[in-house]
Image: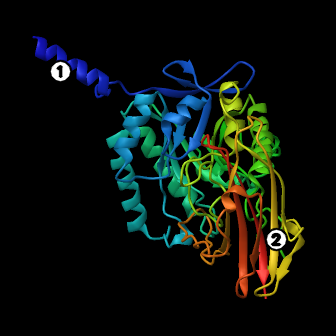
Amino acid sequence: MKSLMLFFFVLSVLGLHAQASKVEIVTLADGSFQLLRNGEPYYIKGAGGTVKLEELKRYGGNSIRTWGISDETDKILDEAHKLGLTVCFGIWMGQERQGFDYTNEAAVKGQLEEFRRIVRKYKDHPAILLWGVGNEMDLDYSNFEVWKHLEDICKMVKEEDPNHPTMAVTAGLDVAEVKLINRYTPSLDILGVNTYGDISYLPGAVQVYGWRKPYIVAEWGPYGYWEVQKTTWGASIEETSTQKAETYRKSMEAIMSDTKHCLGSYVFLWGNKQEHTATWFNLFLESGEQTSVMDVLIRGWSGKEPQNRAPSIDTFLLDGRVANQNIVFAPGQLVSALVQSTDLDKDKLTYIWQVVPESTDKKSGGDAEIAPKPLRGVFNRGTRRSSSVQFEAPKAGQYRLFIYVFDGNNNVATANIPFLVQ
């Protein structure tokens, strides 16, 4: 008897016999939408990514978003459930720009049946919050059949799993696409929108464009590399981490201002990846440090102040100039750089300087990119203690000067300036 009781206790701890959640969307008396999870109101304070889930929970987040199936899927779901987090389970629909043909009946049927298998396998996992069916299928596409196939998938999901809503995600918000989805995909429950930079337009645009169901901001973050000013040679100018923090703060305010139609959001990216640069969307460095953007999220999610705040970038100059001044050097020219940072916790700051060739593997839609490696031997030893440096311009080409300012408490400030050598 004792061994049997111990067996069931272990099952309970592991959550293996936990019941599937029931998630539904209800319309309140004032016409606003509300997400209910197991009968309780649930507002999504989420992040796109599958790492550092303990930090997400500790900072006040409650949900993660995935984009597709991997060898880690079961582990991710179990870890999320153990921490009390939910999962927007991503089902990756084939994309036209990646070669998927929505006029190929066999391929379309095969995709539908594969998705049926996935839903059947995972629908009863207690961490599931909703199904994220497809991501940016509208990016660089021309075949509107994708929306008809999306309808078939949404109907299938409802047949297999009536307990979790469906969300499809578009790249930005477009009035024509809203009309197409309204016409061809009536079974879709939630519109997910990936949008960056200034998203104050979104709550009004959703209504003006004719979407009458709830929406979720499925990705949001800094100004994207497609939205910002460029140098004369075409290099996108990235915000400093301090500027990004202000952008995230304003975006979070805009998202949370729509209490009638928005069910929450998933900030991007809860992790680290090369996308245009090594720092553009990341909330963590590869080594684990986090920027002042995290301070904004902690305040917004939990209403509390961070235990230790990240440094700020107050001034960053290359040859006395800022990033948008089209900085050009001759090979071998001696140049100087300066950063001025503030740390509100009075932590001792250290610095890492890097000169990195401009990426030649830039893609769209978040596709995997190969990161260029920093040049070696550019700086003298001892620069970790220095907020200013001198170096010789490398051979002809496009580059970025990166600065990382560390506070010794797992926080960092980041910035980069593009420059041309010719």
In front of the other: 324 or 275: 324
User: Number of callouts in the render?
Assistant: 2
Q: Quadrant of residue 157?
A: top left
Residue nearer the viewer, 295 or 17 = 295
Q: Earlier in the sequence, mark 1 or mark 2?
A: 1
Q: Quadrant of the C terminus?
A: bottom right
Whether residue 389 is visible here, answered yes or no, is yes
Q: SS at mark 2?
A: strand
Kind of residue at disc 1:
Phe
Q: Residue at image x 59%, y 68%? A: 143
Query: In this figure, which residue is indicated by the disc labeled 1?
Result: 7
Report x, y in % for residue 187: 55, 43
Q: Is residue 200 left or right of residue 397?
A: right
Q: How far is the residue under mark 1 from the one under mark 2?
A: 66 Å
Question: Which disc number belongs to residue 336?
Answer: 2
10 Å crowding of disc 2: few (<14), some (14-19), many (20+): some
Q: Position of residue 105 (x, y in %)?
A: 42, 67
Number of other residues with Cα within 10 Å of mark 1, as a class: few under 14, some 14 to 19, many 20 or more: few
Q: Check disc 2 and give the amino acid type.
A: Ser
Q: Residue at x 58, y 25 (%)?
A: 42
For the N terminus, which image quadrant? top left
